[in-house]
Amino acid sequence: MVGDTYRFGEYELDRARHQLRRAGEPVHVEPRALDLLCHLVEHRDRVVPKNELLDEVWGDRFVSEAALTTALRTVRLAVGDTGSRQQVIRTVHRRGYQFVAAAAAAVLGAEASAGPGQGDVVKSTAVGEPLGADRQAIRFCRAGDGTRIAYASVGSGPPLLKAANWMTHLDLEWTTPVWSHWLRGLARNRRLIRYDERGCGLSDWVVPGFTFEGWVDDLETVVDAVGLDRFPLLGVSQGGAVAVAYAVRHPERVSRLILAGAYARGRQVRARTETESAEAALDLDVARVGWIHQDPRFLRVFASQFLPDGTPEDWDEFTAFQRQTTSPSNGVRFLEEFARIDVSEIAHRVACPTLILHSRDDERVPVSQANELAALIPDSRLVLLKSRSHLLTAFEPAWDEFLSHIDAFLTA
């Protein structure tokens, strides 16, 4: 790795010269703090524990955590970051720190000895993409009603297609802590194909139809556009129901099915008592008001249902991301349609091996929904993870377990 130059925003971190530059001009950074930045950038694919930083940067010298805190503050000031902003170096509560800025790594070629700045050859994609993955390619296809659907492919190896779910954006996902670790983890050693569903992300926001059947049709359109024959299919949250419906419609194409945080019946459909029906109706009414008026109080509560153990900063980032993924009116339409989803009558027709992963204490979709899917789908296996998150974060033990189960399932 010696000689690598890492570029992020206006900055370049030149390890060969042990120098940080901004817009080509050197930025003074105390050597120990610069060592800290180098170590975080080199290990940007994971959270680096405090003890590791103390051992690697300070070596055998005995220092307190105060020295680490001071060096970290110095680095953040040098790269325009702050303890609250954290767009370059993210503090992971009780675990350590991670370099999260979008960047690219370049290695100095042999011919570069002729002079500084020559012979730079880009050798990896944006930081946040899996090591060795191809640069993401975004393309578009059209559904039968003319709606333009954006899809993307990244990585190499056997395919894994992820059915669309709400709150995605093929471009912005790489730089948000909501999804970036999902992309890195799922595209490692395989080709990950995903798309933005109609109404959000880079797909058309103004569409002729907004129905569950339309979402299944859009998945068919993407499969045909990519040219997939037989492949494993992943469905997350309401995308799980779409994946189930597609697997039933095309058993010859889906080799394996993975359902994460999924459900067979939306909240209105699964309500069995007057109280449950009233709660479901109230949930929708609050959502309508919150989304239409972009009420920050509602949006933060909504974010906390997905990330219950998140910090206020996490919820603010989640809120900022969801505002960029769709319009307020579409946000309401999504939630209304989610509440009416029902694949309980067809799930028993899924013919492929199925892995169901669900947080045991999911606060958005109760674990009872995972139990129901496991009971309905004949050849299924249920794994409950120790988490409260609806969308697992990179900073909880359940995330590594989640990826391990998927890897084992797809290679079995």
Image: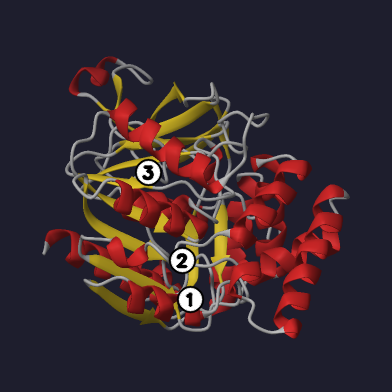
Between the C-alphas of marks 1 and 2, the distance is 7 Å
Rendering coords of residue 166 (x, y %): 57, 50
- Say what amino acid the circle numbered 3 marks: Glu
* Above or below: residue 293 compared with residue 222: below
What residue appears at the point 59 percent right and 49 percent down from the top-left corner? 167
Secondary structure category for the residue under label 1 = helix
Residue 85 makes an appearance in the image: no
- Label 1 sits on residue: 369
Q: Nearer the viewer, residue 289 or 281?
A: 281
Q: Residues within 10 Å of mark 1 (few under 14, many from 20)?
A: some
Picture quarter with the N terminus: top left
- Mark 1 or mark 3, which is nearer the start of the sequence? 3
The reply to whether callout 1 and callout 2 are in contact (CB within 8 Å) is: yes
Q: Amino acid at mark 1?
A: Gln
Q: Residue at x 68, y 40 (%)?
A: 326
Q: Quadrant of the C terminus?
A: bottom left
Kind of residue indicated by mark 2: Ala
Numbered label attached to residue 129:
3
Q: Is residue 181 above or below residue 133?
A: below
Q: Position of residue 114 (x, y in %)?
A: 26, 15
Residue 156 in which image quadrant? top left
**Tag shown at residue 262:** 2
User: Residue at left 71%, top 54%?
Assistant: 319
